[in-house]
Amino acid sequence: MESLTTFAVLVAVSAAAAAAAWVVIRSKFPRTPFQYSCDAYMLAIRGFHSDALRLYNKAIAGFARAETTMPTYMSRSGYRVLSLTHAWKSITLASLGRPDDALASSERAIELDSTDRRVQVARATALHAAGMNAELLDLANGHLEKDASDVNMHLYRAIALLTDGEVDPAIEALSKAVELAPHSGVLHSTYDIVKRDSEMRELNMEKARIWLLEDIEKIDEIARHSELFMA
C-alpha cells in the first residue's frame, strides 16, 4: 500500500514538473501567428467556428505585432499567410451567419494576396453567403479564364448558375469539375445527385426547384474546402 502511495506521489510530482516545463518552453518559444491560424482552420473544418474565430483573431493580432517586430518576415512571407488567415476567417464568418463581416475579411485577403486559389475560393464563399450571385458568377468566370483547372471555381460557377435557374450549364460545370478530379467520390456523387434532381423538372418543376436549391448548399460545402482539390 505504501509503495502505491509513493508511486502516486511520484506520478503527481512528475506531472507537475512536466506542466511547469511546458510553461517555460511555451514562454520561450510562443506559438507563431500562423500556428494559431492552422489550429483555427482545424477547428473550423470540424464545425467549431466560434472557437476558430477566436484563434483567427489572435493570429491576426500576432501578425499586427510582427509588422513592427519582424518586418523582414512579413515582407517575405508574412503577408501571404496573413492573407490566407483572413481568407479562412471569412469562411468561418460566413458559416456563423455573418455575411457582411465575411465579405470584409475576404476583401482584406484579396488585397494582401489575390494569387492564392484558396483566397479566391474564400471570396467566392463570402459572395455566395451574402447572396451576391452576379458577383459570384463574374468572379468564377474571370478566374476560370485565367486558370481553367481550378475545380472549386467550377463548383462555384455551378452554384451561381443553379441559383439563376441555369440548370443545364450548371451540370456542365459540375461535369468539368469531375473531369478535373476523376478520383473524387464526393464530386461524382454530387454530380449524379444534381443530374437526378434536374430530371425531376419534367415531372414536377416545384419539387425540382426545392431539390436543386438544396443541392446548391451541398456544392457550397464541398467548395469551401479548397485543399481537397488543390494540385
Image: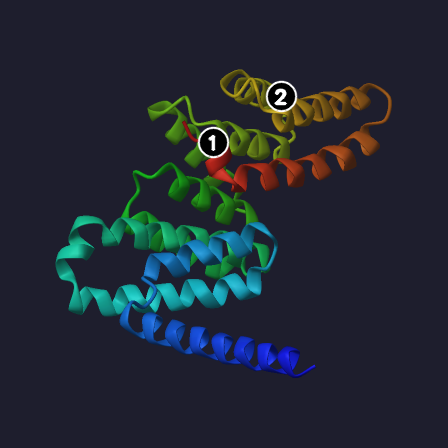
Question: Is 55 displayed left or right of 84 in the figure?
Answer: right
Classify residue 169 by image quadrant: top right
Q: Amino acid at mark 2?
A: Ile
**Element type at mark 2:** helix
Q: In this figure, which residue is indicated by the disc labeled 2?
A: 171
Residue drawn at point x = 63 percent, y = 31 percent: 162
Residue 209: percent from left, percent from top: 76, 33
Q: In this figure, which residue is indicated by the disc labeled 1?
A: 153
Image quarter hosting the C terminus:
top left
Residue drawn at point x = 61 percent, y = 26 percent: 187
Question: Is 188 displayed left or right of 179 in the figure?
Answer: right
Q: Give me the C-alpha separation between circle 2 and circle 1.
A: 14 Å
Question: Is 145 displayed left or right of 175 in the figure?
Answer: left
Whether residue 130 can be seen here: no
Residue drawn at point x = 38 percent, y = 30 percent: 143
Are discs 2 and 1 less than 8 Å apart at CB?
A: no
Residue 127: percent from left, percent from top: 49, 46
